[in-house]
Every structure is written in structure tokens, then in C-alpha cells.
């Protein structure tokens, strides 16, 4: 879905180069460039998330050891993400953000009962839809009995590419969906894309809390 002219906004000076290239390729409908820039931008986003997680485990592993709740941990991680994504100008790191302005009963996808993610990196509608939502994170703590399947299903839907028939009150085309399971000794992760989902790395990151 190519953005209409009235939805185009100027890209701010100082914006991350990969993000700028991705926005421009998407605006111009250059499929080869979109494929290349989206892959590069995904890698950059995932690298920044890993850095934020390293900061969390270096400075705040006590939150996990002391049994703090999920929202406390998510909020702290969001602070590190906000610092690291400082060159993603006009994009925001929000927690528990209600993504749509329409009533929940009018939403045409699987998130009718809950349309929020634990952490979002998005433009809050500043940019057109296909480049609005860059990162959606769902978090579960290792101590939780929740298997995370509900969150994974929601992430899988968020990354579905938009089509010309995508309803206006559905949110798709999120660039990266990420499920994190955090424990006091480290974390595991699953990355979602329109082609399915795989771990960011093959091994759980069990060294983070032991450094």
C-alpha cells in the first residue's frame, strides 16, 4: 500500500540513515530497495535491542532476582531502548500503548480483546502506516506460568504485511515483532516476520546476568 501524498511527512534532520533510507524506499514503492533497507534496518533494530538488554542485565538484574512484576521490568527496558533509539527522530518508545483510535469492538483482527503491546517503537502516526510501526515487543518473565502463545499469536499478526485491502482499523506491517522471556540468569528471544519466526540467535542468552 503506497502512501498517499497527504500522508507524507518530511524526514527530520539527523534521522538514523537506515531508517531514512527505508522510509524513502517505501514512499517511492521501490520493492528491491524496500527489501534491502528493511533487512538492514531490522538488523540495526535487533542490535539496539540486544544492547538495551545488556544494560538491563548489567544494571537491573535485581528486579528479576527480587521478583518484581512484568510491568516494572518492561518499563526499565523501555528506558534503555529510549536512550539507544535516540536517532530515530519522530519515533517513540511506549509501553502498553493503545495503538488505535477506534473502539475495540470495531477492530477487524485478532486483537479485539487486547490491542496493546508491552513495548512499542513507533511514530504514533507521524509517518504513513507502512513505516509507522517499527518494533513490537512482548515480554514474559521466566517465573510466569504463561506459555506466551497468546502474545506470540498477536506478534505474528502484527507483522503481516499490509495489502490494498487491509482495513483502516487493522494494524499490520510492523517491521519487527519480538517475544522475550526474561529470567534472572538470562533471556531467550523469538523474532517474528512475515515469513514466520525464529530466534534472534540459536542459543538462549544465558550469559547476560553472569557478567
Image (cartoon, helix red, strand yellow):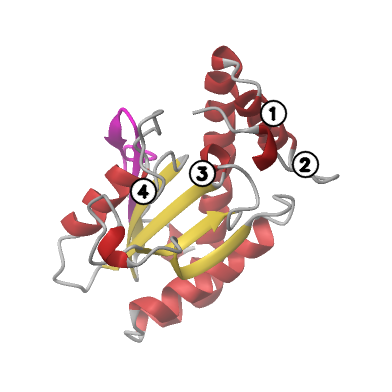
**What residue sits right under mark 3 in the picture?**
46
Give the mark nearer the N terminus: 3 vs 1: 1
Give the residue displayed 29% in from the left and 59% down from the top.
Answer: 106
State the CA–CA distance, disc 2 to disc 1.
9 Å
Give the residue displayed 44% in from the left and 61% down from the top.
Answer: 99
**What residue sits right under mark 4 in the picture?**
170
Picture coordinates of residue 155 (x, y %)?
A: 31, 49
State the CA–CA distance, disc 3 to disc 2.
22 Å
Image height of 111 relative to 178, above or below = below
Residue nearest the observer in this picture, 17 or 128: 128
**What residue sits right under mark 1 in the picture?**
24
Give the residue displayed 22% in from the left and 74% down from the top.
Answer: 143
The mark closer to the camera, 3 or 1, is 1
State the CA–CA distance, disc 3 to disc 1.
21 Å
Give the residue displayed 43% in from the left and 81% down from the top.
Answer: 72
Kind of element beneath mark 1: helix
Picture coordinates of residue 149 (x, y %)?
A: 17, 55
Image height of 185 relative to 121, above or below = below
**What residue sits right under mark 2 in the picture?**
11
Amino acid at each position: 500500500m503506497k502512501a498517499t501524498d497527504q500522508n507524507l511527512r518530511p524526514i527530520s534532520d539527523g534521522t538514523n540513515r537506515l531508517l531514512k533510507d527505508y522510509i524513502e524506499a517505501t514512499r517511492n514503492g521501490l520493492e528491491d530497495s524496500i527489501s534491502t533497507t528493511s533487512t538492514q534496518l531490522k538488523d540495526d533494530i535487533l542490535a539496539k535491542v540486544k544492547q538495551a538488554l545488556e544494560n538491563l542485565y548489567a544494571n537491573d538484574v535485581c528486579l528479576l532476582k527480587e521478583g518484581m512484576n512484568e510491568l516494572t521490568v518492561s518499563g526499565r527496558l523501555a528506558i534503555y531502548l529510549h536512550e539507544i533509539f535516540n536517532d530515530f527522530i519522530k519515533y517513540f518508545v511506549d509501553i502498553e500503548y493503545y495503538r488505535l483510535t477506534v473502539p475495540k469492538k470495531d477492530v477487524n483482527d485478532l486483537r479485539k480483546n487486547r490491542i496493546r503491546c508491552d513495548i512499542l517503537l513507533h511514530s504514533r502516526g507521524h509517518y504513513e502506516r507502512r513505516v509507522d510501526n517499527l518494533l513490537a515487543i512482548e515480554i514474559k518473565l521466566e517465573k510466569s506460568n504463561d506459555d506466551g502463545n497468546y502474545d506470540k499469536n498477536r506478534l505474528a499478526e502484527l507483522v503481516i504485511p499490509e495489502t490494498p485491502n487491509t482495513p483502516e482499523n487493522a494494524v499490520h506491517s510492523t517491521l519487527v515483532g519480538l517475544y522475550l522471556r526474561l529470567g534472572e540468569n538470562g533471556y531467550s528471544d523469538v523474532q517474528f516476520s512475515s515469513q514466520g519466526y525464529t530466534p534472534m540467535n540459536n542459543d538462549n542468552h544465558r550469559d547476560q546476568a553472569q557478567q
